[in-house]
Image: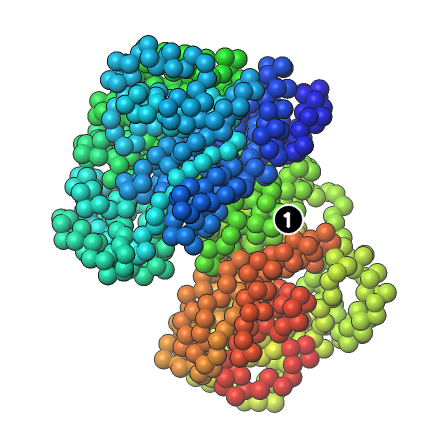
Amino acid sequence: MTDLEAELRKVVRGEVGFDVTSRALVTMDASNYRRVPLGVVAPRDADDVAAVLEVCRERGVPVVPRGGGTSIAGQATGVGVVLDFTRHMNRLVSLDAEARTAVVQPGLVLDRLQEAAAPHGLRFGPDPSTHSRCTLGGMIGNNSCGSHSVAWGTTADSVRELDVLTARGRRLRLGPGWAGAPDGLRELVEGEPARLRTGFPELPRRISGYALDALLPEKGADVARSFCGSEGTLGVLTEAVVRLVEAPRARALAVLAYADESAAAEAAAGLLPYGPLTVEGMGQDLVPSAAALPRGGAWLFVETGGESPAQARARAEAIVRAADVVDSAVVTDPAGQRALWRIREDASGTATRMPDGREAWPGWEDCAVPPARLGAYLRDFRALLAAHGLRGTPYGHFGDGCIHVRIDFDLMTEAGVGRFRRFSEELADVVVAHGGSLSGEHGDGQARAELLPKMYGTQTVGLFERAKGIWDPDDLLNPGMLVRPAPLDADLRFAVLPREPVDVVFGYPADGGDFSAAVRRCVGVAKCRTTSVAGSAVMCPSFRVTGEEQHSTRGRARLLHEMLAGELVTDGWRSTEVRDALDLCLACKGCRSDCPVEVDMATYKAEFLHHHYAGRRRPAAHHSMGRLPQWLRLVARTRTASLVNALASVRPLAWAAKRLGGIAPEREIPRLATRTFSRWWERRRGETAVGGGGDLVILWPDTFTEHLSPSVGQAAVRVLEAAGLRVALPPTVRLKGAPGGDEMTVPLDPVSLLRGRERVCCGLTYLSTGQLDRARAVLRRTLDLMEPVLRTGAPVVVLEPSCAAALRADLPELLHDDPRARRLAERVLTFAETLERLAPDWTPPRVDRPAVGQTHCHQHAVLGDAADRRLREAAGLSGELSGGCCGLAGNFGFEKGHFEVSVACAQEQLLPAVRGAGEAAVVLADGFSCRTQLEQLAGVRGWHLAEVLAEGLGEGLGEGARE
């Protein structure tokens, strides 16, 4: 392998990676399969590809082309050299609006082509649900389709010409009229005309096998079209000329509700004469909440287009009238349509879990039958599932007769794998009996190629083998796919994982306490690899900045998978490869909500760091910032905040402190409040009659509000009291009885008096640095302090979103053995939720100003911001907050080596939004990190929503943010 790597480095200008990380990142795609490659090459151009092929041919090493790695049949994995086209060969070479064509490289992501075509009123027709990360090369390799195939067909229908390199180094330009055909291909076709005319089922989604029938004279002898769907087994694509279609000026979405999926399937074919753009189907098991959908048990999403909104709507209403439905809705609002389409597109991830949490897997995930037979096929499919004791929820392209489904196969045991094989063989017979194709979109790969003789017969499969021999006589390209395939139950990615649960600290309740099951959540659909943020989405900021797979949620999950497997990553929790990949994880928790399968990389990172540094020296930042609450309490207790601020303003001293603390030298050390929020509270309580007869709420004095931004706490107290609520702080001693009113901050226990007051803490900084033993101790002490509160009905109001998220999500998962943890988590409310639930009749002051800023990433991922949106609207704060992450993310942006990534994250959405706002705009930033990032990078003061409302009440905050 060393010689191969050295030879490739001599002749390739792109990157050559034979290291553990490079290989581990591509052991899997989005399928059930895993194969370990020798190395990965990111070619810069076609010459690099030719050089790789020459070296590998001389050494007999297989080559596997790979795009976005979202293939579901295993065809993007291999044991030789993997070609990664996403890094360099990812350009839109040209776009000719008049000719409606584009020239693209194989690594170009589909959405980038769509964005370039949109200003010309054009688009690429096929649009798989992975459009934000799948590549044109991968789409051509799989002959991908997408939801609009009833209108614009498959990728093969949109291909004009293809530049291809054969395994033996020939450069071919494929097109119609036998253009670019390798020697012998025409003779093969002309020798078997009858078989090619009768041996291929006629249906819109026939993707299985090689499209040799496209080479018939009546079909134009189109070599480019025939190449589509060959899964990298015939040649390596280096450039493509593709056809664009005219995009409708307006669209409407008719959502048709049916009693069940069978009724929806039966109805789909009857809607095709109305010329819809889509006829997509899904059942209620895949819908997180059916509140946004018409009443029913299954739905068809039927999109129509027109020259005007009225015309598009009229066409949608005509379809509604023609359909026999339980209920229906026509949506013309673009935002409403996008929200509904997100439900459908996320099904590829949400389908990986049964309603009871059981895992479900691909493998028989895209069979297609003639649309008119879909209802009958689904009934037979359901019967076969029941006969094998399996479950799955079909969804997909009902108008094309193509069904996606993930099934709860047990792929961890020998008996379960045996059932997987028997089911596969029997389902193939069912599909063929209905005149269908084993693959209707995702290709055969390793998942279905073994069963192609059932669909085509042995003689036609023999033709496939002869065609492969003409294109690739050395069997160099992606061997084991399509012809002479590997068994469908070999190379399963689960086989290498430990059979017993790994000893971990977090409870992983959604995964039965099994860390391996948590890591298996990542099925590779790669939504984390999107290069732009849509709406309020957050995931995955580090990938968008670096563009490197190891800094995506999927990449990190793959490395954790290999760590558990122990074959490539051999040093377990001590792995430097996993540590380095997790280093740029901001722990933003965006994946917890934006990933369709709710991978929680922030938790996995904390778990890994805990084990990685167990009994070892930790980085300085883990001590300086990971233990921030301790240091700040010490400063408060000694009343030395002014001294610390003065010392921090002396550059040499600040430089030394940052160097010792592992803090980025580019960062300014935030100033501390000279009087903490709690001291302000005690003084105010002594001077002012407070309280009242309203509901009691416990205001959580988080570390940031307490020591760095007391004005936020002060403002919150004033607003909550103005809303008629009675505010108290948590106990600072361990009380024996249930408290009332302000007794919560009065030490009553003489033993506690001797020991001194204690403070509640969410443990956030210990969690983010993986100091889980310390976090557990801090949280148990917090639960002891809060126990009297838990005996009351009082909610706990947390102003800092990251602290609220830690209490609501991390606390019960870390202290899964303590029932008090769940009880406290259930009490946690955000500031806006508190006002909405406990003071529903209160009217906030009208601010009537535009608002800019960014929804806190933890708020987006864990807490939700619906109540905040409604509160802002009631206060007259107009405008939408941006998505993404501020990039500071607690300790992340302060750590040495993270500054550039931190700034790049802020530059993506937050800083442009703030810089583009008018002078009248108020900059909202509920998180201390967000406010700090704004101040240090843009010189802008960010405001917590509580501060804005307090100002609106005329409650001057006079004492300042850092008093």
Visible in this render: residue 85? Answer: yes
Name the residue at 47% across, 34% down: 240
Q: Amino acid at mark 1?
A: Leu
Task: Give residue 667's position: percent from left, percent from top.
Answer: 73, 62
Name the residue at 49% across, 39% down: 104
Looking at the image, is 460 positioned above or below residue 499?
above
Task: Give residue 651's position: percent from left, percent from top.
Answer: 83, 67
Name the residue at 30% across, 57% down: 250
Front residue of 549 and 409: 549
Q: What residue did someone put label 1 on?
A: 584
795 lies left or right of 23: left
Looking at the image, is 412 positioned above or below residue 794?
above
Visible in this render: residue 817? Answer: no
Crowding at dot 1, Cα within 10 Å, few <14 / some 14-19 / many 20+, comes out as many
Task: Give residue 818's position: percent from left, percent from top.
Answer: 52, 53
Name the residue at 57% across, 52% down: 541
Residue 895, located in which quarter of the rendered image? bottom right
Looking at the image, is 589 positioned above or below residue 920?
above
Task: Give residue 585's position: percent from left, percent from top.
Answer: 61, 49
949 lies left or right of 563: left
